Amino acid sequence: MSIMSYRQALNHTLSEELARDPNVVLMGEEIGKFQGSYRITEGLLDEFGHKRVVDTPISEEGFVGLATGAAMLGLRPVVEIMTINFILLAIDQIVNHAAKIHYMFGGQAKVPLVIRTPSGGVGQLAATHSQNFENWFAYCPGLKVIAPATPYDARGLLRTAIRDDDPVIFIESLSLYDTKGDVPEDDPYTLPIGLAEVKRQGSDVTVVAYSRMTPIALQVAQLLDKEGISVEVVDLRSLRPLDRPAIINSVKKTNRAVVIEEGWQSYGIGAEVAATIQNEAFDYLDAPVQRVAGLEVPLPYALNLSQASKPGAQDLKNAIYRTLEGGKRWQK
């Protein structure tokens, strides 16, 4: 095992997959000569050349459409969209074409396409550069949507996504790129899409999280352990397909649930998780499912307002207090 940042895990995996399979190609704005806005593709142009690492024009709809056609003809494009905010320009190509071609062609055409894009806000990027749209794509049949929270998961799931014959939306978090963790560097391991992982065992309450919210959930679980509260943390990792059995099994064990997500609460991933618990584990619940999410406003530019708009550790702690003992014993 070696210590590797989330950024390094992605970079090394892309390099290895380019070397392993000549059909893998990278496309995106400034990923070659500039080495990517977040340095995920650093060094790959020098190593593999312009035919494998393709700088595209600033036209998301155009190069996602190009990648979809290339995937139908046998290549395995990995497209980088600079942020998920810009993916809206390509939503027709993704939702109306890439997601549906295999079905509409009766299985005669495949679209082994990966679209990598960072989600969420970091720093003062304001309203149009700090959004979470992963739920828009998790809504769409024909797409797979994954959102790893650790370097280990990012490495294993990116390998799986590149080798998958279906289009995959690979959600990264701007806030996670510099985080570090143990990764087996020389082991070409893969992780299955569609399986959540219990990142921490607990007995009093289940916290369901994904992407940037998973480290926050683990931080809160560690703090509450000192207060005698045992928190189980379930990291979804995959948003579509969603590992409903993992969620239900945890709630049956703890009898309480809190769902946390970075994006807006209405119509979000948390709503789907809460509905799953309601439908399949209602008789096991000792308290209503609590939800924690971002405030439903365009993210402000002012730093204090931006921070106040995002869900944090204290918000999660308060939700856990509310769900325990009717919120009376533990409320702070």
Image (cartoon, grey):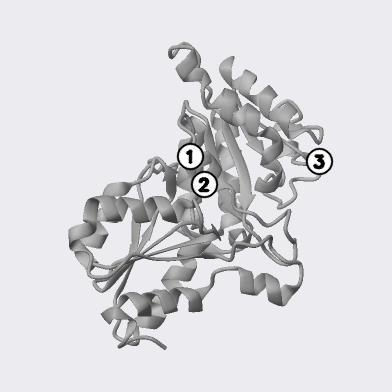
Rendered residue at 18%/59% (across/down):
283
Task: Name the residue type under label 3.
Answer: Lys
Q: Amino acid at mark 1?
A: Tyr
Residue 250 visible from this viewpoint:
yes
Residue at the spot x=60%, y=33% of the render?
Answer: 18
Q: Earlier in the sequence, mark 2 or mark 3?
A: 3
Q: Residues within 10 Å of mark 1 (few under 14, many from 20)?
A: some
Q: Which residue is mark 2?
A: 135
Q: Is residue 22 left or right of residue 222?
A: right
Q: Which of the pair 152/264 is nearer the observer?
A: 264
Image quadrant containing the N terminus: bottom left
Q: Of callouts 1 and 3, which one flags the residue occurring earlier in the amino acid sequence?
A: 3
Nearer the observer: mark 1 or 3; the answer is 1
- The residue drawn where x is 57% and y is 17% is 72
Residue, disc 3 = 33
Where residue 316 appears, as percent x and y from the top left, is: 45, 73
Viewer-closest of 106 and 223: 106
Q: Which residue is mark 1?
A: 139
In this rendering, the count of numbered labels is 3
